[in-house]
Image: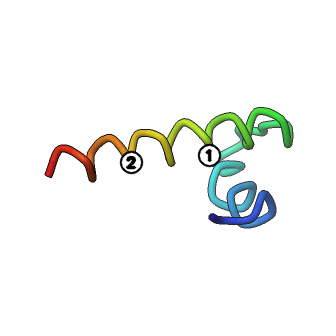
Amino acid sequence: MQSITKCKKILNRKGISYTDEEISMIRNVLYKLAEVVHELQ
């Protein structure tokens, strides 16, 4: 799992800023999505 710091560097670009809580929620959703895609293959 990527660290919050690394996710923050990726997501907080182009003047958009997310809180640590928002980044954690986004990261969790993306990992769940990846699990579903992996299971369908």
Residue 9: x percent and y percent?
Answer: 72, 61
Q: Residue at x 32, y 41 (%)?
A: 36
What residue is drawn where x is 76% and y is 33%?
A: 22
Residue at the spot 78% in from the left edge and 39% down from the top edge: 17
Of the image marks 2 and 1, the number of the one nearer the N terminus:
1
| Quarter where residue 16 is shown | top right
- Name the element at disc 1: helix
Q: Nearer the viewer, mark 2 or mark 1?
A: 2
Which x, y percent locates residue 14? Answer: 64, 47
Residue at image mark 2: 35
Q: Residue at x 68, y 57 (%)?
A: 7
Q: Is residue 17 left or right of residue 11?
A: right
Q: Amino acid at mark 2?
A: Glu
Residue 31 as seen in the image, left or right of residue 19: left
Question: Could you tell me which secondary element the residue under label 2 belongs to?
Answer: helix
Circle 1 residue: 27
Task: In the displayed orientation, state which residue is furthest to the right.
Answer: 20
Q: Residue furthest left?
A: 41
- Colour scheme in the image? rainbow
Residue 31 position, x and y percent, is 50, 48
Quadrant that contains the N terminus? bottom right
Q: Marks 2/1: CA distance?
A: 12 Å
Instruction: Report how many numbered discs are placed on residues in the image.
Output: 2
**On screen, 15 above or below 3?**
above
Q: Looking at numbered disc 1 in the image, what kind of residue is underneath it?
A: Arg
Q: Residues within 10 Å of mark 2 (few under 14, many from 20)?
A: few
Residue most extreme to the front: 39
